[in-house]
């Protein structure tokens, strides 16, 4: 039995729970953000035979210090990856699938075309599968964003992650306003497209900063928001500065609903893709 390295974590990772899903990912030569980011929910999700697929390889061109995904120079995209994702979905019997990627600033379209190909193949597999994509900012390339939006995933998610004052420290290669622009542009391209974003608490942000970020996000027309506790995935990552109480999580959830979000998941183990189906169920 392996315990998540965070000392206050009560979630245990039992390898017996992981076997079937891990074996499927290995069989099709796929990566998951669950494993690469050392998510504390991995045992629970893998036991349910679900995972957040990480496409475009497992090496990111950005240097976000809160994230444990490998940084560096990625290999060329695997041309068979979209089909391999579909085969894994079929094998696991997933009905709500989340597709995300490493950030690929080295590619002219940021990897948008691979998202599109993957989405189209999933639709061919079954039009009844609900698809959520968690996309990077594509360096602000709106042509890349447009082709993803035009494939009509059920939910498009793009995480703001933290407050603007911390961007130079924990997201130095990202841009707060650019990310807000991504969320805004999605709605301009398709006003009916459901959008989602996520933020982490515990990086050293102040209460008013969190409220201001939530206001900025909802003003883009964003429908859903996830609010979770940042847990440093390793000793080389940015440290966890504070731990958020249940009362604080509830405060932000209530505040956000007052602002106009349609649904918010707010809690210690909440992650942007964790129990992703709950958001759409709440408004269906």
Image (cartoon, rainbow, N blue to C red):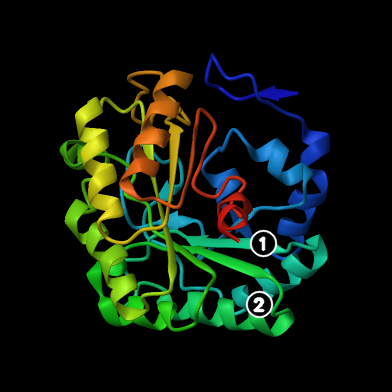
Q: CA distance from mark 1 to mark 2?
A: 11 Å
From the image, tell me which residue sits under label 1: 96
Dot 2 falls on a residue whose secondary structure is: helix
> Which numbered disc flags the more N-terminal residue, 1 or 2?
1
Q: Vertically, is 172 above or below 222?
A: above
- Residue at 75% x, 72% y: name it: 87
Q: Residues within 10 Å of mark 1 (few under 14, many from 20)?
A: some
In this rendering, position of residue 179 left or right of residue 201? left
**From the viewer's perspective, is residue 183 above or below residue 166?**
below
The residue that disc 2 covers is 122
Image quadrant assignment for residue 203:
top left
* Residue 78 image offset from top left, x and y in percent: 55, 74
> The N terminus is located in which quarter?
top right
Query: Where residue 30 appears, x then y in whole percent?
Result: 64, 61
Front residue of 192 and 100? 192
From the image, which quarter does the C terminus lie in?
bottom right
Q: Is residue 195 above or below residue 218?
A: below
């Amino acid at each position: 039995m392996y315990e998540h390295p965070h000392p206050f974590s009560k979630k245990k990772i039992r390898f017996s729970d992981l076997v079937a899903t891990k074996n499927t990912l290995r069989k099709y030569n796929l990566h998951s953000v669950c494993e690469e980011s050392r998510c504390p929910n991995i045992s629970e999700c893998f036991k349910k035979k679900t995972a957040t697929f990480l496409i475009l390889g497992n090496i990111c061109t950005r240097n976000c210090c809160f994230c444990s995904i490998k940084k560096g120079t990625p290999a060329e995209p695997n041309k068979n990856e979209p089909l391999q994702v579909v085969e894994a979905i079929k094998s696991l019997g997933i009905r709500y699938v989340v597709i995300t990627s490493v950030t690929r600033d080295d590619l002219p379209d940021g990897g948008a075309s691979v998202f599109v190909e993957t989405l189209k193949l999933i639709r061919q597999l079954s039009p009844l599968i609900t698809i959520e994509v968690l996309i990077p900012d594509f360096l602000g390339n709106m042509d890349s964003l447009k082709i993803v939006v035009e494939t009509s995933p059920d939910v498009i998610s793009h995480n703001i992650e933290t407050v603007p004052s911390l961007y130079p420290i924990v997201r130095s290669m990202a841009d707060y306003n650019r990310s807000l622009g991504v969320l805004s542009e999605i709605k301009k391209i398709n006003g009916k497209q459901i959008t989602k974003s996520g933020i982490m608490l515990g990086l050293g942000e102040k209460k008013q900063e969190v409220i201001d970020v939530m206001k900025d996000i909802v003003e883009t027309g964003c429908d859903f928001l996830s609010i979770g506790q940042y847990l440093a995935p390793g000793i080389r990552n940015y440290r966890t500065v504070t731990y958020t109480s249940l009362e604080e999580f509830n405060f932000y959830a209530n505040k956000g609903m007052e602002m106009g979000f349609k649904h918010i998941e707010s809690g210690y183990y909440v992650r942007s893709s964790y129990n992703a189906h709950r958001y759409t169920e709440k408004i269906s």
